[in-house]
Amino acid sequence: MNATVPDVSSLTLEQKLTLMDTLWDSIQAEQPVFPLPDWLKEDLRRQHEEFLRDPGRTVSWEESKARILDRHARTPNAARS
C-alpha cells in the first residue's frame, strides 16, 4: 500500500481525536476480532478463575484509578499533565 498520509498538524485536538476514533472504527469494521497470543489467553483464563474463586478480592475501577493517581502524585520526578 502506498497511501498518502495527510498532514494533521493543522488540525485541532478535537479534530485529531475524532479522526483517530474514525480510524479505529474503520479498523474494527475490517477485522472485528484481533487474535490473542496463547500466553495472554492463558493469563486471562487464570485471572478469571481467580475471580470466580474469590470475587471479593476485586477492586473497582474508581479505587484502582485513585491508587494509581496517588502513587503517581507521590513519585518525585513524575510528569504532571
Image: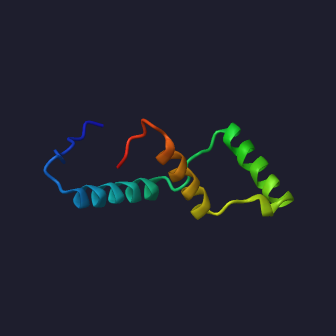
Name the residue at 78% across, 47% down.
Answer: 46
Percent coordinates x, y for residue 81 in the rendering = 35, 49
Name the residue at 81% across, 53% down.
Answer: 50
Most foreground residue, 77 or 34: 77
Percent coordinates x, y for residue 11 in the rendering = 17, 54
Most foreground residue, 55 or 11: 55
Name the residue at 79% across, 62% down.
Answer: 55
- Residue 29 horizontal side relative to residue 45, left or right: left
Name the residue at 35% across, 59% down.
Answer: 21
Residue 4, located in which quarter of the rendered image?
A: top left
Most foreground residue, 16 or 67: 67
Residue 55, compared with residue 38, is above or below; it is below
- Which color scheme is applied? rainbow
Residue that protrudes farthest toward the left in the picture: 10
Most foreground residue, 13 or 40: 13
Percent coordinates x, y for residue 49 in the rendering = 82, 54
- Residue 24 horizontal side relative to residue 68, left or right: left
Percent coordinates x, y for residue 63 in the rendering = 61, 61
Quarter of the N terminus within the rendering = top left
How many numbered circles does the render carry? Answer: 0
- Residue 62 horizontal side relative to residue 50, left or right: left
Residue 57, located in which quarter of the rendered image?
A: bottom right
